Image (cartoon, grey):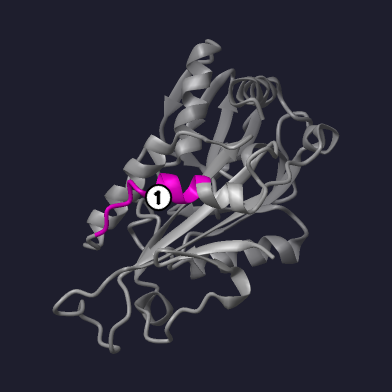
Amino acid sequence: MSVVFLNGEYLPKDTARVSVNDRGFLFADGIYEVTPAYRGRLFRWDHHLARMRKGLAAIAIDYDAAPLEDVKLELLARNGLADVPVAYVYVQVTRGVAPRTHAFPDPPVQPTVYAFANEYHRPSMDNWALGSRAITAPDQRWARADIKAIALLPNVLAQQAAVDAGVINTILVRDGIAIEGTHNNLFAVFDGVLTTAPKSNYILHGVTRDFVIELAGELGIPLEERAIPLSELYGADEVFFTGTTTEVRPAIRVDDRMIGDGHVGPVARALFEKFLEVTGG
């Protein structure tokens, strides 16, 4: 039975309980973070911690997230995941338990902290090399997508649309601009130039996104951070997604339109090979 962390205790998952008055349950009032671990080593924990701190500050939850590093490592150990190639640890912090009213509890209550760990099963390289397909849908999220909030209903609906269409992802489109995937950042390649949306309140500031940009610099791949109109995306040489539980995942069709020559391109391939080399994944 898997072990989870809840409010300072390590518990069997089936015995963990959260109050029905928790504001995460009532209002989706909280943030979350997902950190990958390669053979037991947390990947870029400092970057994940920095993003989590920004999220907590943005929604005014007073909680010190630094000790979660030890919690994540302990969850990997207790669940037998310290030696697997790739695992991930999910943690969420809500504002806590209080009678239902829209304003913050006054005085403040203790935040609710929940975490669990799972193994990540990467697609085989043969399947990865086949590429994937995606559809597009209007971006219906709130205007602070940079906060990793647990309020993910628009993402859920968009991902279900992908499932219903038999594809792996939905690209969210706002005012004609391809923004990102339902749970990952979006990249395209035009004439050898790696292109992605600039950081703003409309995209998640992905840790893996930043890492892939660094890898592109090491490989000498030119980069442009700019808006990508959907009409232009259809004509890209390559399209791929990046994220904690995505890593680097190419798409060869978008809305039934072939991307490039319909095969995984050299930029995505080079970046993923470098990704695997650096992470040891």
Q: In percent of the image, x 47 and y 22: which residue is there? A: 214
In the drawing, does residue 226 fall left or right of residue 101? right
Q: Residue at x 36, y 50 (%)?
A: 146
Work out which quarter of the rendered image holds the N terminus and state it.
Answer: bottom right
Residue 254 higher or lower than 270, as above or below = below
Judge whether 88 appears above or below 274 on screen. below
Range of residues picked out in magenta: 63-73
Give coordinates of residue 259: x percent, y percent. 71, 36
Q: Which residue is drawn at 48% across and 28% down?
A: 211
Q: Residues within 10 Å of mark 1 (few under 14, many from 20)?
A: some
Is residue 263 in the magenta section?
Answer: no
Residue underneath mark 1: 68
Number of on-image labels: 1
Q: Quadrant of residue 101?
A: bottom left
Between 74 and 173, the one lying in front of the other is 74
The C terminus, quarter of image: top right
Q: Which amino acid does label 1 sit on?
A: Leu
